[in-house]
Image (cartoon, rainbow, N blue to C red):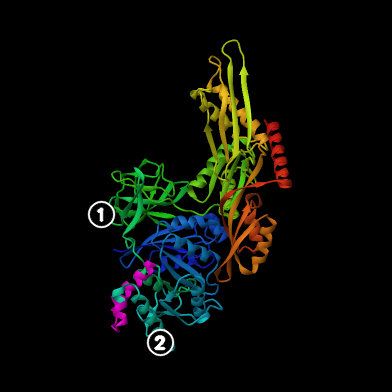
Amino acid sequence: MKKINIALAGHTSVGKTTFTDTLLYNIGSTDTLGRVDDGKSLSDFDEEEIKRKISIHSSVFSTTYKDNIINIIDTPGSSDFSGEVVSCFYGVDVVILIVDAVNGVEIESSKLWNRAKKMNLPVIILVNKIDKERANYNNVLENLNENLDTRVFPVHLPIGSEGSFKGIVDILKMKAYTYEKGGKKGKEQGIPEDLKARAEELRNDLIETAAEANDELTEKYLEGEELTPEEIMQGIKDIILKKEAVPVMVCSSVQNIAVTEVCDTLISIAPESNTREVIKAFDANDKTKEIEIKLSKDESFVGLVFKTVMDQFAGKISYIRVFSGVLKAESEVLNSTKDRKEKLSKLYLPFGKTQNQLDRDAEEGDIIVCTKLPHAETGDTLSSLDRPVILPEMELPYPVHSVAIKAKNKKEEDKLNSLLHRAAEEDISFKVEYNKETKETVISGMGELQINIILSRIKEKYGIDFITSPPLVAYRETIQAPAKADYKHKKQTGGHGQYGQVFLEIEPLPRGTGFEFVDKIVGGVIPKQYIPGVEKGVREAMEEGVVAGYPVVDVRVSLVFGSYHEVDSSELAFKIAGRQAFKLAMEKAKPTLLEPIMNLNVYVDEKYTGDIMSDLNSKRGKVLGIDNIGGGIQVIRAQVPQAELLKYSIELRSMTSGTGSFEIEFSHYEPISGKIAEDVIKETLRRKEEEAKEK
């Protein structure tokens, strides 16, 4: 029995969820045709999804069709939930990129295409909404060829266009299928006369593409021999797997035209769960040792938790892709990522918001659900106890929107933090961390919408009120010149006193180097047992600099001289001396503030490029370049201070009427001076005074 694991992905509103609902209805997985608009979609079942009429979470469906196991993951289209999409990509073998028949490649489509490419995942394209006004199949094909760095070849040809769309010609079978209203499957018929020439042309292109799969087929084709149907099909599969060309299908999921034929085509050409044969992993006992995992049920068990749901009744629900081996209910496996054993109970097959108990062992290629695994989180590798391995870490998009949060009622602070961490466990792209420097709890995600939905749930379900604000920026301090200082710590008490004297030399290091401590003591002027105390004191002093109390970085500290007392000296005395000597030296070394600089990629329609560039310049940004990725979409690459980007997700949405999106990651620290530095120092000191009063 073949197993096919697919993720449906694409820009928001291209019809992924409607396609899922229609497909499941057509193949008999459900008796009810769910619809987003009436709140009865099988895929969008969450309260917020029903209310907003958009997908917020991925939905997983395990079903069978024509003796094939098909695992379908319907993913959200909004960039606010892109982390959910990417984590699901790790559980599948092929991405079905759905594009709108009028709009073609849009911003999220392009980003998802690039993400699939980066992850080495094959892609098949589905052109949906071909019944829309102004839909033109030839235009879409041209758009795809222009805007994706690949070659596309149609495996479907629409019969009719816009409102007259009524079926397809399947180029693989060279058969036509037309639909009557309410029909689940098309009626097979001859290819319409007006489409025969075009169908033959596409068939020839398809055969030529298949012949490119390997030298043997190429030679046979060039010598004028006909490829057999089996050779053509295998050639197409190989081309898809090699990612040398991309097939294009077509349907109207709203009108339920050609959806079943799309499923039939997928069964014919989509890579199966074990087509890759092997995947890379690391030995859990020696993480530098790379090994290959054979995708076979005859191997040791290896699985990946690619999705986690926190259910108020069932508790933690873990979605697991089985890559190799067999997994039995009531068995024990190793969570290799955390080096903890996990005791399994029953195994289930996911079907949207429900789970159906699995009446067999889970095997390679299955996507299953386990409940109440105590340690498992999204991204964790599960493996057999006798062969512990770890799959490569998930590479998720960097959070782009952050807010500081605290409970209005301090007594509810612990409960709020617990709920936030629970949300982070469920949504891997949502982060919660306490910043020791700024003394704030900061939550971060892929956009304002994602964070607002999480917070509104907490407020409505648990009645907790909270205050949010832009997070404080984690500045740093450094020095710009070398300096020297000495400090003698001398304290006499009734018994033993305290004595330690150190001479320090400090000098700046290249940006990003961090800290170096150099012991230059000769002749035993400071005994060796006290030198670690000096370094500890220096490190303590570096936790709070002299400019505005921010941590100090990129400094070399050399201990060059000192003195001690045979009775009164101790490690503590030298720690105090080291701390004070460093502060004195830093004050002489032209201390300055550093601010974090972020790498920023902004994806926008080209008509907004001028406005975005102007805005970035006003934010002290440096534009590094502009890349045209097709479809009128441009990527503006820039470096911008983090302080200028705290509300950028809101600002960009406003500037681009909600169409723009961006990616961000930390780059480096840069010095700031003048009025900007003065304002930062002034605000920092004001905040510290307020904190002191509150205490």
Q: Is residue 230 magenta?
A: yes
Dominant secondary-structure state across the stretch colored magenta: helix
679 and 589: which is toward the camera: 589
- Image quarter where the C terminus lies is top right
Residue 436 visible in the displayed image:
yes
Toward which corner of the image does residue 152 lie, by quadrant? Answer: bottom left
- How crowded pointer 1 is (Cα within 10 Å; few <14, some 14-19, many 20+) is rated as few
Residue 472 visible in the displayed image:
no
Query: For the residue labelled by badge 2, is the local secondary structure a helix, a strand or a loop?
Result: helix
Q: Amino acid at mark 2?
A: Lys
Give x and y (percent) for residue 453: 57, 52
In screen coordinates, is 259 left or right of 432?
left
Label 2, label 1: how far apart the Cα atoms are: 48 Å
The residue lying furthest to the top in this view is 494
Give x and y (percent) for residue 18: 48, 66
Q: Amino acid at mark 1?
A: Asp
Give x and y (percent) for residue 8: 45, 64
